[in-house]
């Protein structure tokens, strides 16, 4: 199994120093990737999403102080944003990090947040499918026009290009049938934050049924803020369920780096 780190760019304990320390530790200890979460303007009825450092900005900052770890979003709520801006941000991050960017995207589920940022909620899935096509067009260096139902342009130059070009890695989040189909068609990674080990295999089966589904690396998240024995049992359960990667949250600042070290030692994570 591959082990990643949930960066923890949200909540009352997130600070620039803690983000930097966590990223450096992940890089040095040999974790494969760090993942950031996202919300733009969640309603006050969801206080757990009220304080979040903007994910792509954070990853650009961390690109400068890490060397090998992948830098990913899991996930940004894409249809609340301009795809042209996100395409430029992702390309820039990929260039600054020498090809380490992973753009994780999802449609989100809170209509109130879409209202807050003046974005349409009902057609978010259709718009995201078109956004993915637009990303591939722009990142590939194609100088031709793009004509879509929602987005398009007649003439424009998109530079600098990402080192990964049109194949810049995507992670698709979500567990609806539409999200799973999208992952199977377009993603390098799929990650769930809500499925149980019991449900996980049936979701993966739907991804695998798509044309590129067998190439998608599937995974989930877990937390290590208790005992090593407890998280070991959790890891084994997810292995049995078929998860190929786990993004681990290492809890509050107090003891976080020590838990990262203990986990890396227990599971044989090495700096490759």
Image: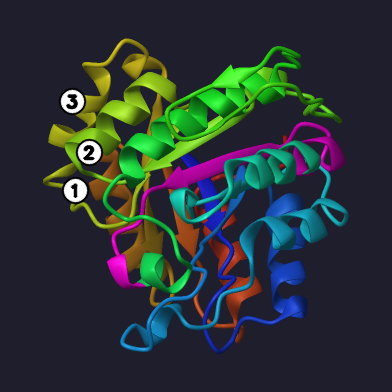
Question: Is residue 242 visible in the rendered structure shown here?
Answer: no
User: Label 3, on which residue?
Assistant: 205
Picture disc at residue 136: none
Residue 246 counted in the magenta span: no
Element class at badge 1: loop
| Quadrant where the C terminus is found in the figure | top right
Dot in front, 2 or 1: 1
Q: Earlier in the sequence, mark 2 or mark 1?
A: 1
Dividing the picture into quadrants, the one containing residue 58 is bottom right
Colouring method of the image: rainbow
User: Label 2, on which residue?
Assistant: 240
**Residue 77 placement (x, y as % from top left):** 46, 54
Seen from the viewer's position, the closer of residues 267 and 89 is: 89
Q: Residue at x 40, y 24 (%)?
A: 216
| Quadrant where the N terminus is found in the figure | top left
User: Label 1, on which residue?
Assistant: 197
Q: Residue at x 30, y 44 (%)?
A: 123
Q: Earlier in the sequence, mark 3 or mark 1?
A: 1
In the displayed structure image, the side of residue 198 where residue 127 appears, left or right: right
């Amino acid at each position: 199994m591959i082990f990643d780190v949930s960066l923890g760019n949200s909540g009352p304990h997130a600070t620039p120093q803690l983000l930097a320390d966590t990223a450096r530790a992940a890089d040095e200890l040999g974790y494969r990737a760090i993942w950031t979460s996202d919300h733009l303007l969640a309603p006050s009825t969801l206080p757990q999403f009220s304080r979040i450092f903007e994910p792509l900005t954070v990853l650009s900052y961390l690109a400068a102080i890490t060397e090998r770890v992948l830098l990913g979003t899991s996930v940004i709520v894409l249809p609340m944003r301009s795809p042209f801006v996100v395409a430029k941000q992702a390309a820039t991050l990929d260039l600054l990090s020498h090809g380490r960017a992973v753009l994780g995207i999802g449609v989100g589920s809170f209509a109130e947040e879409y209202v807050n940022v003046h974005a349409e909620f009902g057609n978010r899935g259709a718009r995201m499918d078109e956004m993915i096509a637009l990303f591939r067009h722009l990142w590939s260096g194609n100088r031709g026009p793009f004509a879509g139902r929602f987005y398009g342009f007649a003439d424009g130059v998109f530079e600098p290009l990402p080192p990964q070009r049109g194949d810049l890695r995507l992670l698709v989040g979500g567990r609806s049938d539409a999200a799973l189909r999208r992952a199977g068609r377009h993603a390098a990674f799929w990650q769930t934050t809500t499925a149980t080990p019991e449900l996980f295999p049936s979701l993966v089966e739907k991804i695998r049924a798509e044309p590129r589904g067998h190439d998608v690396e599937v995974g989930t998240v877990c937390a290590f803020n208790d005992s090593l024995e407890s998280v070991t049992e959790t890891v084994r359960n997810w292995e049995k369920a078929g998860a190929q990667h786990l993004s681990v949250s290492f809890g509050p600042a107090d003891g976080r780096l020590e838990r990262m070290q203990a986990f890396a030692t227990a599971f044989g994570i090495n700096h490759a």
